[in-house]
Amino acid sequence: MEQESVHEIEGGKSRRPIDCGRKKKLGEEAGLNCGTSIRIPLYSTERHRLHTEMRLSRFTEIEFVYYPVLAAIGVPVNLLAIVILSRGKCGLSKCITRYLVAMATADLLVIVCNVILYRIAHLYWGDTFLLYTPVCRFILFLAPTATDSSVWLTVAFTFDRFVAISCQKLKTKYCIEKTSLVIIVTLSPLFGLKNIPRPFVYIHYHTVNNIPWGCLVSSQFYILPTWIAFSWIEQLLTPLLPFCLILLFNALTVRRILVASRARRSLRDLSNGENNKDTEMKNRRRSIVLLFAISGSFILLWMTTVVYFLYYRISGIFNHRSFYNPFANFEQAGIMLQLLSSCTNTAIYTVTQSKFREELLNAIKYPFTLIGKLVK
């Protein structure tokens, strides 16, 4: 097959141009076939080439362990969260419950599409039909759609809690089950439409018996103004804008809480004395802790990706892809952390919500209880 300049992708995000012959050679040396998704940039010097090959080998070894473990944890914990929250016995409002169920569903889709069908398939199943170009394109349409939905549902939940705490007049109309359902039903189709152009970004990696295999970003993605604009829009929408909005809403929420707490404490001290407990503040504290835990987890786990995005654009790597990238491992670490964020919410519910813990323990005990009854 004639050598051509192609571009590799990672989780629906674009990569620098690579040479298929070089990738095949290095992939065989690492024990991988040509269809395996690995990151090999162009090199400015032989020293950079050798250094990057060593780093690639080490990081690929980590990925071989990390992604199966992530899938093994992410699928069951998100399924458990969906089942437990759907029962509505966790002491949360219907509005909050709808958001949390939708977030757990989106996180589950991220694990299935991005981790299992894409990353694990490329690492372990070199000859699977999942690498057939039309199937691969469809997976790389689903993966960013699931990620976008998960991220923006977190934004919607954060805004809902901001309105509930800071905007008392709007609260009665906005923070209700009907509104949450409308937002949830709207977001996923909206981001599905946004990602329709994505399959057209990719070309096949190579052909076997006239069958196209693999997905690589076409060189046109880096040249045509339309595709450059699309790249900017999608990366601003996820993750930069959600990251900034969550920080903003949390900052405004904290400010409102501090002001309201001082005012309520003063009124309570004047009327009933200092030792009187404020039951309303206790009830509100549960949802506030949940909000800050979820949004704080999102900020921490997506921070690496956001920092790399800013560096990626400001430093001009996108426009000078033939240069050696000294931050390749930093980028890969960001991807790993952002995918980890799809598994953390269940742990957050367990730590912060006592009734969720009770339901989780009951769900864990149920199979053993059932076996005990059958034995008797």
Image (cartoon, helix red, strand yellow):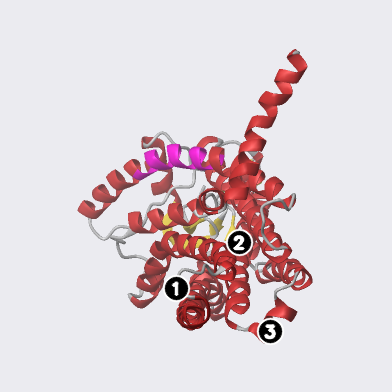
Relative to the observer, which residue lies in front, 363 or 99?
Answer: 363
Point out the tag, 3 or 2, that comes first from the N-terminus: 2
Question: Label 2 crowding class (10 Å Cα cut-off): few <14, some 14-19, many 20+?
Answer: many
Residue 170 got which mark?
Answer: 3
What's the residue at 48%, 77% (across, down)?
261
Residue with the mark numbered 2: 150
Point out the tag, 1 or 3, that comes first from the N-terminus: 3
| Residue 341 highlighted magenta (yes or no) | no
Horizontally, is 67 left or right of 311 in the view? Answer: right
Q: Secondary structure at mark 3?
A: helix
Residue range of the region highlighted in magenta in the rendering: 59-71
| Residue 69 highlighted magenta (yes or no) | yes
Question: Could you tell me the amino acid type at mark 3?
Answer: Leu
What's the residue at 63%, 66% (across, down)?
153
Mark closer to the observer (1, 3): 1
Q: Position of residue 309 (x, y in %)?
A: 41, 69
Q: Position of residue 210 (x, y in %)?
A: 66, 45
Relative to the observer, which residue lies in front, 182 or 134?
Answer: 182
Point out the tag, 1 or 2, that comes first from the N-terminus: 2
- Is residue 294 visible from the viewing direction of this image? yes
| 278 lies above or below 2 | below
- Is residue 214 visible from the viewing direction of this image? no
The secondary structure making up most of the magenta span is: helix
Mark closer to the observer (1, 2): 1
Residue with the mark numbered 1: 274
Q: Quadrant of residue 224?
A: bottom right
Q: Quadrant of residue 156?
A: bottom right
Work out which residue is located at the far top of the displayed protein and give it: 376
